[in-house]
Amino acid sequence: MPTGVVKWFNDSKGFGFIT
């Protein structure tokens, strides 16, 4: 998964299991 998507997901959802 692209880094930008990971950052968005982490920032938006607050989940850290996708790295």
Image (cartoon, grey):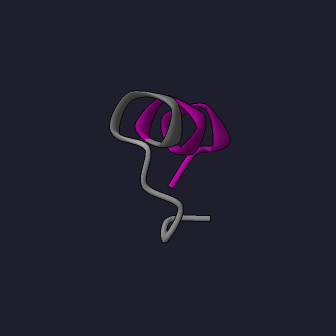
Q: Is residue 15 above or below residue 7?
A: below
Among all residues in the image, which is located at the extreme left?
A: 13
Whether residue 11 is situated above or below residue 3 in the rendered picture: above
Left or right: residue 19 versus residue 14 is right
Decide if residue 17 is on the left or right side of residue 13.
right
- 15 over 5 or under it: above or below: below
Up/down of 19 relative to 11, above or below: below
Residue lying at the far bottom in this picture: please name it.
17
Q: Is residue 2 inside the magenta stretch?
A: yes
Residue beneath the point at 59% across and 36% down: 7
Magenta stretch containing residue 18, yes or no?
Answer: no
Image position, residue 11 (x, y; %): 51, 30
Q: Quadrant of the C terminus?
A: bottom right
Residue for point 54% across, 45% down: 6
**Which is nearer the eye, 17 or 1?**
17
Q: List x then y, in percent, for residue 14.
A: 43, 44
Q: Residue at x 50, y 55 (%)?
A: 1
Residue 10 screen position, x and y as percent: 50, 42
* Quarter of the figure with residue 4: top right
Left of 6 or right of it: where is 9?
left
Between 11 and 5, the residue placed more toward the observer is: 11
Residue 3 in which image quadrant: top right
Q: Identify the magenta region.
A: 1-9
Callout count: 0
Q: Name the main secondary structure of what is drawn in magenta.
A: helix
